[in-house]
Image (cartoon, coloured by chain):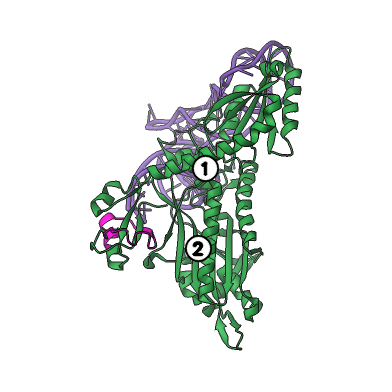
Chain colours: A green, B purple
Amino acid sequence: MSEREAFELTPKGENFSRWFDEVLFKAEILDERYPVKGMYVWLPFGYELMENVMNVMERLMRQTGHRRVYFPGVVPEGVLSREFRFIKGFEDSIYWITRLGKQEIKEKLALRPTSEAIMYEVLNRWITSYKDLPLRIYQIVPVYRYETKATRPMLRVREIVFFKEGHTFHATYEDAVKQVELEVWIYKKFYDELLVPYVVVKTTPWDTFPGAKYNYDLITIMPDGKALELGSAINFGDLFARTYGLEYMDENGEKRNVNTTSFGISERSLAALIAIHGDDRGLKLPPKLAPIQIVVVPIPSKGYEDKVLEYAKEVYNALVGDYRVELDDTDERPGYKFFKWEMKGVPVRIEVGRKEYEERTLTLFRRDTMERSLVPFEDLRSRIEPLLGEIEEEMRRQAKEYFEKRTVHAKTVEEIRENVGEKIVSFPWCGLEECGHEVEEEIGYGILGYEENALEGKGEKCVICGREAKHRAWIGRSY
RNA sequence: GGGGCCGUGGUCUAGCUUGGUAGGAUGCCGGCCUUGGGAGCCGGAGGUCCCGGGUUCAAAUCCCGGCGGCCCCA
């Protein structure tokens, strides 16, 4: 990639991986040239975008009674390894601190791979009575996981920078069940706002997070046909609490175990947004999340340089304060600026040249459809709001179409085989473990999860045993 | 986990087979001319050739080891 091709991308349909790496760099989301594998520099534009994404989630979290906290980023080995089932899923991927300055350390410290152990260690002092429950907290911190597989920017990293993890504590199992339903609701609202399509599935018992009763995953599909896990809502029941001595006293003075859940998102959510909506010209950002919603580009011509620039400033001033707007008065040529702002996914561009100055009009360009329209200056403010809404609706429509094109419902194993790989395939499943395993063996991929009772009463038959199917299970390649 | 490709001014690269003056493009700085979809011309600055060791009169080039990056497959 040379600077000459600063605004050129490998076509997305030709090589998605390459397209994705290039767009992250050229749209100035990440600088991938940091000399530690799997760790990347977040550039200002990318950071602002990610902040906007996180703000959507934080708003939802606060609305539903979660409060932000901070727990330390290192944890002693003894605390971390107390729960064997827990560490089992992570033991190969932990970063250990084994020295302090020149001295060998007495007890190794781990960089947090997630924060359950760190929090639970302290929370048994916070929670003593039923009156302390429920407790809902979250934090946004980096977590470290030594990925042994090939790393990928934003998708498979060794430092997850924007890990937003919610942890909740409840008196009863039923309360925890309700909480997980709330978490799924939060996820849905969140990804609806990101314009990222998804399916919510329960994971199979044999693929459930170690130490969990069950968990729900949100799954989307990347342009290369692979499933990407977008988030997980986990019900631990009292399994974790028992290990860490999390107990409370109920109304009758009896000791009981706390029930806990956790859920989280990361920059993968942004990766999905970028991957699904971007095109061969770069990013396409939802108006609500774009760091710059509107860019004003003056197009000077001989003798009109000052007048055009003045007019462009007038346009800028009419919008600033209500919108995230930028006036690009840099000394570049218009064509260069067009490519640049399209790469960055700015939803609306306002072009202002001699013609617009003389007519007192504006040319509006929308990134999603690449269409231009001419409007009188007086109509600008009344036109811009509906336009941003239209762009969002169009992007939502495109996302739906995208998802439908990459999924299919199969009725037989043969049908699954014909489609899997290219698509993510759903199929009727009776719910029996042996039937699930048999599908996985026949197809060669794992079941991603199932939509619980989605097919109840629909008369569909399990693809293996032919009995009445209860669930719609999903299978396919995944990240 | 298996296989493959690669590392040279800020960026992308030529040179490596056959050891001998590091070349180009782009970007950057100054100037001129321009501006409706990546302009052009003139001048200028910018280099531990990823790191360590070895072979050699001589290493970007050959050998060994390490580090880092990318791609494909599972």
Judge the density around disc 2: few (<14), some (14-19), many (≥20) Cα neighbours within 10 Å: many
The residue located at (41%, 36%) in the rendering is: A13
Residue B38 x %, y %: 57, 21
Residue A182 part of the magenta-drawn span = no
Between residues A57 and A212, which one lies in front from this camera angle?
A: A57
Q: What's under tag 1, amino acid-wise?
A: Ile
Give the farthest residue toward the bottom. Answer: A253
Judge the density around disc 1: few (<14), some (14-19), many (≥20) Cα neighbours within 10 Å: many
Give the farthest residue toward the front. Answer: A457
Residue A452 part of the magenta-drawn span = yes
The vertical placement of A245 against A62, above or below, is below
The residue located at (57%, 41%) in the rendering is: A286
What is the C-alpha distance between the residues marked 1 and 2?
23 Å
Pinpoint the chain carrying mark 2: A
Please give the residue where the numbered disc 1 appears in the rendered image: A274
Q: Say the numbered circle drawn on residue A233.
A: 2
- Left or right: A421 in relation to A156: left
Secondary structure type for disc 1: helix
User: What stretch of residues is rendered in magenta?
Assistant: A438-461
